[in-house]
Image: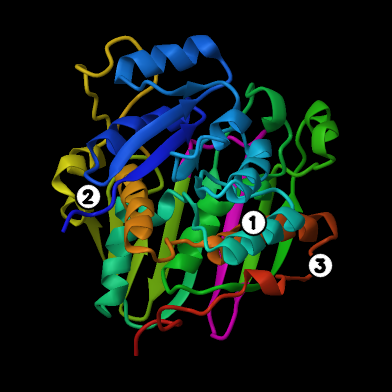
Amino acid sequence: MTERTVRIALVGLGFGAEFIPIYQAHPNVEIAAICQRSRDKLDAIGDAFGIRDRYTDYAELLRDESIDAVHINTPIPDHARQSIAALRAGKHVACTVPMATTLYELREIVTLSEQTGLRYMMMETVVYSREFLFVQDLYRRGELGRVQFLRASHQQEMAGWPGYWEGLPPMHYATHCVGPVLALTDAQAESVTCLGSGRIAEPLISKYGSPFAIESCHIRFADCDLGAEITRSLFDTARQYRESFEVYGSQRSFEWPLIEHEPCVLHTGEQPTLVTVPDFADRLPEPIRKFTTEGVYDSDANQHLSFTQGSGHGGSHPHLAHEFVRALVEDRPPYPDARRSANWTAVGILAHQSAMRGGELQELPEYTRFAARATVGGGA
């Protein structure tokens, strides 16, 4: 029996263009269209990859009844509005992080997804990175023992980034560190407390009224004894770029390297071992396995464009694309689905709110709660 082919439109062709060769190679996908406001860039990418149907108008794209799903890779302020419009137009949605910037938008997306039966997936890269998949394997095999604590950080210096990035509250872009600490045990956040620290430049503060250089948050998990700590910085903090995830178990613990591209550390009792994690390409259809390798470049498809094709973000891109596609083919919720995506995103929104209120406890709303798929709290 021939499996269904999913017709996907890619919206936003900066970072989003990296997914084009992955989808083109996937056995269950046809790229139905691409969308970009700039006609010159739209045509350059369309010509490079042989994509015929092109839109500069997102609303016009949504009227195309041949499109099954949209994969949104536009600026953060557009994510919720475009996701809501796509769901209302009868399209499944994959959207880069974060899901939204307000609690109201989160609730609207969850409600629409559940009322229509359409699938929504926030494309959180870290939970499909090779490092996370490595730790997830250890957890599922019981090798960590009982999980005792989780920690993650996302540190980045964004000086000079234009537009909406200037002065963005750190926790408004926190899913790269929220996602892994909750996804490992398929836990959900119940409440958060967060402290702001330091102060960014005054011209940046005026953009959002957010003064903090760093925001650090503690997450209380629902229905278990676990907690996690996450740290986020964006401006006026000297640090090499780092998306990190660490888990401490009773038998083994995993720590992300302090410096990018160095080996990870696996502790067995008090004995540390440097480890190089695999890419888990064997979990993917053969035609897209090559995209788990950093820096893959298809010179036949693209000789002139400046963006980097391939895996990105710890080899996560083909895993993300495959999960979304298989969810549609198999008619099941993707991981993370709408409620999980809302839970992870609400942590950051409420963490910033907590920081602005001096660390006041913030409870997550009911519409971000979901039925867990796995045992929470670790092994015996």
Residue wearing tag 2: 279
Residue 195 visible in the picture: no
Helix, strand or loop at label 2? It is loop
**Residue matched to label 1:** 109
Element assignment for label 1: helix
> Of the numbered discs in the image, which one, if any, rests on residue 360?
3
229 drawn magenta = yes
Find the distance from the CA under tag 3 to the CA under tag 1.
Answer: 27 Å
Three-letter amino acid code at the position of disc 1: Ile
Q: Residue at x 57, y 36 (%)?
A: 63
Crowd rating for badge 1 (residues with CA inside 10 Å; few <14, some 14–19, many 20+): many
Colouring used for the render: rainbow
Mark 1 or mark 2, which has the lower sequence index?
1
Q: What stretch of residues is rendered in magenta? A: 220-242
Give the residue type that dot 3 points to: Glu
Whether pointer 3 and pointer 1 mark residues with C-beta atoms closer than 8 Å, the reply is: no
* Residue 351 at x, y percent in the picture: 71, 59
Name which quarter of the figure residue 290 lies in: top left
In the rendered structure, which disc, 3 or 2, sits on the residue that comes first in sequence? 2
Q: Is residue 316 above or below residue 365?
A: above
